[in-house]
Amino acid sequence: MADANGMRIFAVANQKGGVGKTTTTTSLGAALAEAGKRVLIVDLDPQGNATTGLGVDSHRFERSVYDVLLNDIPMVDIVEPTGFPNLFVAPATLDLAGVEQELTTVISRELRLKRALDSVEGDFDYIFIDCPPSLGLITINAFAAATDIMVPVQTEFYALEGLTQLRNIIELVRRNINPTLHISKVVLTMYDSRNTLAQDVAIEVRRHFPEELCNTKIPRTVRLAEAPSHGQPITTFDPTSRGAKAYRALAQEIMNG
Ligand SMILES: Nc1ncnc2c1ncn2[C@@H]1O[C@H](COP(=O)(O)OP(=O)(O)O)[C@@H](O)[C@H]1O
Ligand SMILES: [Mg+2]
């Protein structure tokens, strides 16, 4: 569900690391930007991979999402353009790693991000929040601010492991803070169609998420892994690659609702 201005805010979350959260955030965001949508990527992972992967050097900035979460800095003050039209980033820096601890004593600690986002209300069509691989206060801030949750699921044997715990946290946030919060989209990543296990996993994920599972499966391709080290999203790094095409198809699904 979109907010009052039609802006959709996706928390891209899965507490497992390495499942394709950051790749999906930057690639899908770039594909939507390429389609003419105004997109903001909020980098909530202290690793800052979404920031650097889009060619933005976070060392250049005095302020980052850290200050948004802890020092009441409005989001609009830290938003930076990327080198790509329509695509903006709210950069993360390593000091974000301490936020989880520091937030515990702060008033309205779950709502810091939501309030900060008021300052960009109406400026973007889509906001994608790249969550860290944990279900702590940073991720809860993302869930409190989100209109939607997107869960990238790596197509492997343990794909569904941990999703019950994820659903429990979502349910807690839904009941206490954000009444319309739900998993809107589940997307299979690193899919290898030649692998029969991958096909079985896809069937199993669809059984659990019949409505939520996206038709587009993101293939496993080395080009997707190479793009961030060039500071580019896949859509410009290798515009005709399978990965770029897949994320464009996913963007189309998102735009269709
Ligand atoms: N579809 C894919 N094909 C090949 N490699 C991928 C794909 N998606 C992600 N990767 C690589 O896998 C690793 C983990 O992906 P990443 O998006 O950083 O996951 P997360 O943000 O969930 O930790 C990265 O090295 C990334 O480049
Ligand atoms: Mg990541």
Image: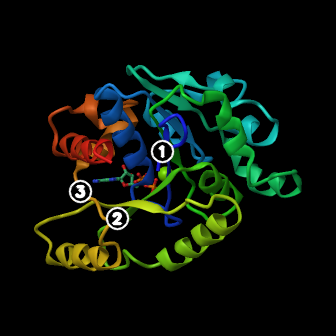
Q: Which residue is mark 3?
A: 220
Q: Disc 2 marks which residue?
A: 212
Expressed as whole percent of the image width and height from the top left, the position of residue 94 reads 67, 42
Q: Where is residue 63, by image quadrant?
A: top right
**Residue closest to the eye, 17 or 159:** 159
x and y percentages locating residue 88 in the rendered image: 49, 27
Nearest the eye: 34 or 224: 34
Q: Amino acid at mark 1?
A: Ala
Which mark sits nearer the N-terminus, 3 or 1? Answer: 1
- Spatial CA span between label 2 and label 3: 21 Å
2 vs 3, front mark = 2
Report x, y in % for residue 244.
Answer: 22, 40
Q: CA distance from mark 2 to mark 1?
A: 16 Å
Q: Residue at x 27, y 74 (%)?
A: 206
What's the distance in space between the residues labelled 3 and 1, CA to CA? 31 Å
Left or right of 193? Residue 10 is right
**Contact check, label 2 and label 3, Cβ < 8 Å:** no
Q: Label 1: state its secondary structure.
A: loop
| Mark 3 residue element | loop
Rendered residue at 60%/56% (across/down): 143
Q: Which mark is residue 2?
A: 1
Q: Nearer the viewer, mark 2 or mark 1?
A: 1
